[in-house]
Each structure stands twice: as structure tokens, then as C-alpha cells.
Image (cartoon, rainbow, N blue to C red):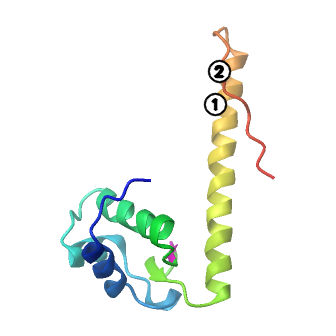
Amino acid sequence: MPNNFSQQERQNLLTALGHGRASAIGAGRLAQILGYPTGGNQVRLRTLIKECIEIDGDLIGAATGRPAGFFLISTLQELERYLDSLENRTRSDNDRRTALINSWNNQDNQQTTRQILDIS
């Protein structure tokens, strides 16, 4: 993964995030604090968060409930809840992918070479 953000940008993100699920901060507000675009789905902010997790090993979680937003994971329970959330999203996305492959291949189309993924 490319390194698209400066160390200062990474540090600014970590400083803006609260510790623990109860301190989650919404994407729009977080983007505003960092000086990023606040419209749409905050692509720049989400890319920064992804990079911090995958490159720096930062423990950043996200939640859709109240309060919705991003936070620094501070307990094993918070980590496992977020991991379960990611797993559920992965399964849901894979179910949609499988349905599209099957629908395409069941019509009078040239068959796709994409294989059904087995996510156990």
C-alpha cells in the first residue's frame, strides 16, 4: 500500500480520535477537524484511516451505532466487536458478489471466469 499521508497528518488523526467506543467521532466532524472535505463519504479521511491501520498498526475502530464514528480501540471487547462487524460486512459483500456471478452465468451470457469465494 502506498504511503499517501505525512507523519503529521497521521499524528493529527490520532490526536483527534477519542479513546474507546464511547468517544467515537463522526466522519464529517473528524474530516472537518483535519481540514479535509466534509461532503460525500470523506474518501480522503477514510484512506488516511486505512493507511494508519495497515501501515502504522494503529488500532482504529469504527461504529455505526450511537455514537457513530471512529475511535481508538482500547479494550479487547471493542476490538472483537469491530472485528465481528468487519466479518459481517465481508460476508454480506461476498453474498452479493456470489449472487451477481450466479445471475450472470445463469443468463445467456459468456460465462465469467471469476470464481465463487468461500469465506469460512
Looking at the image, residue 118 lies above or below residue 26: above
* Nearer to the camera, 15 or 27: 15
Circle on res. 54: none
**Residue 61 placement, left or right of 39:** right
Looking at the image, residue 111 lies above or below residue 89: above
- Name the residue beneath numbered marker 2: 104
State which region is magenta.
60-64
Predominant SS along the magenta part: strand
**Picture quadrant where residue 15 is located:** bottom left
Under mark 1, the amino acid is Leu
> Residue 57: x, y in percent?
51, 73
Q: Secondary structure at mark 1?
A: helix
Among all residues in the image, which is located at the extreme right?
120
Residue at 65% across, 70% down? 83
* Nearer to the camera, 91 or 53: 53
Looking at the image, residue 37 lies above or below residue 76: above
Crowd class of label 1 (few under 14; some 14 to 19; many from 20; radius 10 Å): few
Q: CA distance from mark 1 to mark 2?
A: 6 Å
Q: Secondary structure at mark 2?
A: helix
Circle on res. 100: 1
**Residue 96 placement, left or right of 42:** right
* Nearer to the camera, 102 or 87: 87
Labels 1 & 2 near each other (Cβ < 8 A): yes
Looking at the image, residue 115 lies above or below residue 16: above
